[in-house]
Amino acid sequence: MDFHKLPDIDLKLLVVFDEIRKCRSITLAAENIGVTQSAISKSLQRLRHNLGDTLFVRTTNGMEATPRAEALEAPISEILRAYYDRIAIAPPFDPVSSERIFTVHASDLGMSIFLPIVVPEVKRQAARVRIHCTTANQREVLDALESGDIDLSLGAFSSLSESGIYQQRLFVEHYICLVRRGHPLCKAPRFDLDLFRQQTHIIIASGKSGHIHGRAETILLDEIPPLNVAMKVPSFVLAAMLLRSTDHILTIPSAAAIALAPEFELESLPCPVPLPEFTVFQYWHERFSHDPACQWLRGLIRDVFDGPNSVMERIKSKLDFPPSLSQQSDEARKG
C-alpha cells in the first residue's frame, strides 16, 4: 500500500455519501446532517474527485446512484457502523454479564488486607467476574502494568513512580502490635518502649518487594536488641501464624492486623515505637486509564476503601485495645 496514493477521504465524506444515498436529495441530506446545502455539494465534489466517479446523478426521481455508488453502498455502511459501534464510543462494561478476569498485584500483606474485603464486593456486583492475584518484583510489575498482564497493583510501593503509572489514594495506614491471645502483655498496666525492647519479636523482611514497609523494618531493627529478633520472615501471614504458638511480638500495619488477628486468635496492642504512617494506593498504567472494565474495578475498590462510610472504616472501627492501653495507642500514633 502506497500511503501517498491513498485518497483524502474522511468519515464526514462517507456520512455525506450515506445520507445522499438514503435521501436521494442534497437538500434533505443537508437538513438531516445539519449543514448547508453548499457544504454538502462541496463534499460530493470531493467524493467524485477522490473516487473517480459521478456517484449520484440528478433525475426526475431525485439523486440516483451510479453503478459505482451502488457497489460502494455496503462497504461504506459497514465502515460507518464499525466506527459508531467500536471506535466512536468505547463499549460500556456490564459487570452483571461480564466474565472478565482481572489480574491484581499485591504483596503478601496487601492480599491479606484487600482480598477478604474486595472479593465479596466484586461477587456482589459481578457474580461471574474473577480475580487472579500475583506477586512479583517491581520491575516485573511495571512491565506487566504497561502490557496489561496486570490490571492493577494495590499497596504502598515507592518504586511505582515511573512515567506512565497513575496512582489513587485509598487510605492512610499506621502500625500496631499483635500478640497471641492471653499473652502477659495484654494485662500489663503500661506497654512502653522499654517493655517493647525486652520482648522477643518476629520481623517482616521486605526484601526486594519495593514495599514501603522497608522503612518500618529498618526502624524496628534499630530499636530492638539483635538477640531479641527471634525470627525474620518474608510473609505477614506466616508471621501471624507463627505468633499464635509463641510469646513473640509482631509489629504490623493495622489493616492487616484486623484481617489476620481473628484467623489466628491474636490480640492487638498499641505500638510504642513511632513508626511512620504510609498511604496505600492503587496503581495502573495510563494505557488503561479509560478502559471501562478497569475503570469499574478501580471505582469499586475506591468506594470500598475511601470515605467515612467505606467498608474499610467500618472494619477499622472494630480495632479495640484494652482500656489501659487505649490512650497509649493514640499517643503512639501522634508520635
Image: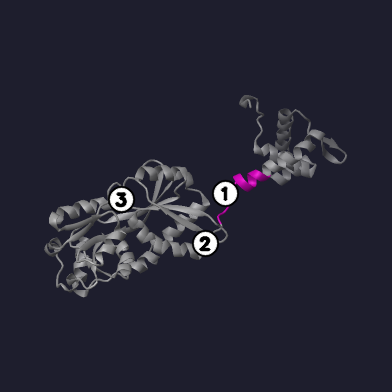
| Visual colour scheme | one colour
Side (left or right) of 272 relative to 238? left
**Given the image, on which type of amino acid does mark 1 rest?**
Ala
| Distance from the alpha carbon under mark 1 to that under mark 2 | 20 Å
Tell me which amino acid carries mark 2. Answer: Ala
**Which of the 4 image quarters holds residue 189?**
bottom left
Spot the residue most to the right.
60
The reply to whether dot 1 and dot 2 touch (C-beta < 8 Å) is no
Q: Which residue is mark 2?
A: 126
Quick one: SS at disc 3?
loop
**Residue depicted at x 15% and y 63%:** 199
Which residue is drawn at the image coordinates 27% and 53% (left, top)? 213
Tell me if residue 180 comes above or below residue 273 in the rendering: below
Residue 40 appearing in the image: yes
Residue 252 placement: quadrant: bottom left
SS type, badge 1: loop
Identify the residue under disc 1: 90
Q: Which residues are magenta?
A: 81-93
Whether residue 36 can be seen here = no
The three-letter amino acid code for the residue at tag 3 is: His
> Image check: 8 left or right of 290?
right
In front: label 1 or label 2: 2
Image spot of residue 158 (x, y percent): 31, 47
Q: Quadrant of the N terminus?
A: top right
Q: Residues within 10 Å of mark 3 (few under 14, many from 20)?
A: many
| Residue 205 to residue 70: above or below | below
x, y percent for residue 131: 46, 57
Residue drawn at x 19%, y 53% is: 219
For label 2, the SS is loop
Q: Which quadrant: the C terminus? A: bottom left
